[in-house]
Amino acid sequence: MKMKAAVMYGPSDIRHEDVERPACPEDGLIINVRAIGLCGSDIRNLTTDSKKGKYPHIYGHEVVGEVVEIGAKAETDLKIGDNIYVYPGEHCMKCYYCRTGHHEMCVLGASYNDRMGGFADYYEVTARQLATDAIYKIPEGQSLIAATLAEPLSSVYACEDNINVGFGDTVVIIGAGPIGCFMIRLAKLRGAEKVIMIELNETRLELAKRFGADYYINGSECDPVEEVKKITGGVGADKVISANPSTQSQNTALYMCKKNGIVVWFGGVAKGSMAEIDSNYAHYNGIWIYGHFGANSIQVQRAFELALSDKFDANMFITHVLPLSKINEGIELTRSGEAIKVVLIPNEELNKDLLPQG
Ligand SMILES: [Zn+2]
Ligand SMILES: [Zn+2]
């Protein structure tokens, strides 16, 4: 049987075309992908030679779908018609890290980018995913589109949880992509006193204004370090989060931080690139540098609940809902800063109800 998928043939060569529909594994299941988020990391992978020539490939990992087929030997309580969010990680639950509560650091699990992803009409859920904590049933009446935010939000939730953003904090966020916007919203929900957003792209900065940071600074028009110092009475911020792919920003973050404050390197940078770091500055000012990645299972669960909650208001972040066939448009809208978060809808006919009218 055939289905449509957004197939990558090389950097920025993505074609919406017919491919073989995955067969239902005996011990797994098949979902009709109802909605899938377009992630910054997907865009990086789709526009660079991420597979080193090994194409065609299908990316996509912020998957929400409806169970349409269940393997005869699948161990699950799920039923046909259930809507689920699939956390993409396939951790083992056996290695040292999994056993100590940190499945985000699993050393035996599979990488989701090595298998066929969800930019397709149908997606295969494996036995391992069913056996671990990767499946989240979406309660009746909740938005499937909002649920796609659970995955990107999990890592943001984990970051602010781990550095304990909270009451009284001044937090600087560098980068107003979707992650930076989540960061603002969550920092305010957690009670941060002042949230300062720094961004170079004016369109993006304007869009981010709806999330309620206390200060918005265009870093291309002034010295953002000076501005942070001004706002904090010369002290610097308690916590500075670099949420963008620039190594330079990882270093600049140090100068915005107060003595004994925390700098987070959240955003991944281009593979192999090395940052030039003023290590003496970090040393003499007692700065804690924290490289953040992923989320543990408690945080994945909490982020899922948050994505569906009224107080988070997912719709504020999702600026574009497009059919999967317009994935290239979605990439452009995100890159230019016109879109905050793009959600794609595969299987246009079946999922008509999720696409905007007209
Ligand atoms: Zn993602
Ligand atoms: Zn593991």
Image (cartoon, rainbow, N blue to C red):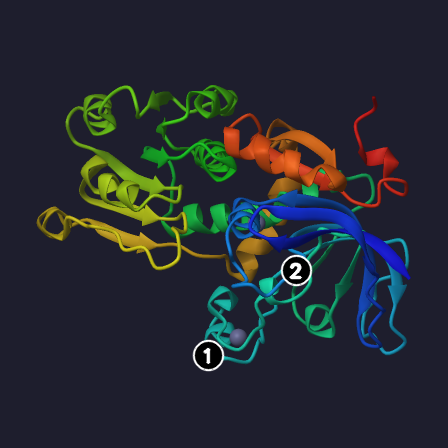
Element type at mark 1: helix
Element type at mark 2: loop
Tell me: 102 left or right of 193: right
Look at mark 2 in the image and give the residue it sits on.
57
Mark 1 residue type: Tyr
Tell me: 269 left or right of 20: left
Q: From the top left corner, tell me how far across and down residue 90 is, in percent.
A: 61, 68
Q: From the top left corner, tell me how far across and down residue 48 is, in percent.
A: 50, 51
Mark 2 residue type: His
Residue 148 appears in the figure:
no
Q: From the top left corner, tell me how far across and down residue 64 is, in percent.
A: 73, 50
Is 199 placed above or below 291 here? above
Is 37 placed above or below 236 here? below
Front position in the image: 35 or 13: 13
* CA–CA distance in space, label 2 to label 1: 31 Å
Front position in the image: 134 or 245: 245
Q: Residue at x 68, y 38 (%)?
A: 343
Is 169 placed above or below 108 here? above
Q: Nearer the viewer, mark 2 or mark 1?
A: 2
Task: Assign the N terminus to one quadrant of the image.
Answer: bottom right
Tell me: 251 left or right of 350: left
Q: From the top left corner, tell me how far across and down residue 169 is, in percent.
A: 32, 35
Mark 1 Cβ inside 8 Å of ligand 2: yes
Front position in the image: 195 or 34: 34
Look at mark 1 in the image and give the residue it sits on.
96
N-terminal label among 2 and 1: 2
Task: Assign the C terminus to one quadrant of the image.
Answer: top right
The quadrant holding residue 312 is: top right
